[in-house]
Amino acid sequence: MLDGEFGQSLAVSVTEVRALLFAGQPLSGASSMGALRAVECRTIGMTGSGWVYAQYLNGSIESDGDVALLYDPEDFTPVTIPLVNVRWLLGEKAKEGEISAEEASSALGIAKSLNFRNRRHSVLLKQWKRGLPRRTAAALEAHFAADRLDHWDRKRLDALEAVQAALS
């Protein structure tokens, strides 16, 4: 299980996960709602994998809003940026020394202040340019180029890893 729609009748519930597990069906989750459900249902046998799962498991994130995003209903292209992706990008840039831990914390605070419906690329960049040193905002802006977005889409990376593991 990877993803689902929040607030929809199609979202996979804990009750449905429990029914599958109690029927003896193995189930693993990653990436988004799958990671959240894997943490919620780990005591009854659901397994999880990936960075997002680990963040829910260790308590670094707790809200389903951290993985929420809006997408274009015609082609399913993401329209907003999930907070988990921002967290991961900022953590990586701080580890690499491209930005400081304090700048990463400030940038995350700015991103958190935006409702997931408003966390569009342009809005986030505008807020970072207003609230961060110019050098920091420019360093982060470089990652918003269309050809670089998939490189830090942590939900996507976790999903690809989970699918690859399932096929092995």
Image (cartoon, grey):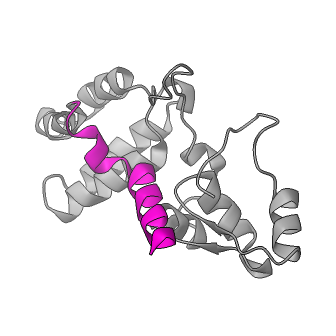
The answer to which quarter of the image holds residue 141 is top left
The residue that appears at 60% across and 61% down in the rendered structure is 35
Q: Position of residue 134 (x, y in %)?
A: 14, 32
Seen in the image, is 32 located left or right of residue 94?
Answer: right
**Quadrant including the N terminus:** bottom right
Q: Residue at x 80, y 79 (%)?
A: 44
Q: Nearer the viewer, residue 164 or 11?
A: 164
Would residue 79 appear left or right of 105 to someone viewing this image?
right
15 displayed left or right of 49: right
- In this picture, which residue range is highlighted in magenta? 146-168
Residue 137 colored in magenta in the image: no
Residue at 36% from the left image edge and 28% from the top image edge: 124
Please name whichever residue, 141 or 129, is drawn nearer the observer in this view of the structure. 141
Indicate the position of residue 159 as horizontal and vertical percent values: 47, 56
Measuring 13% from the left and 60% from the top, which residue is drawn there? 97
Q: Is residue 112 above or below residue 18?
A: above
Residue 145, quarter of picture: top left
Q: Is residue 62 visible?
A: no
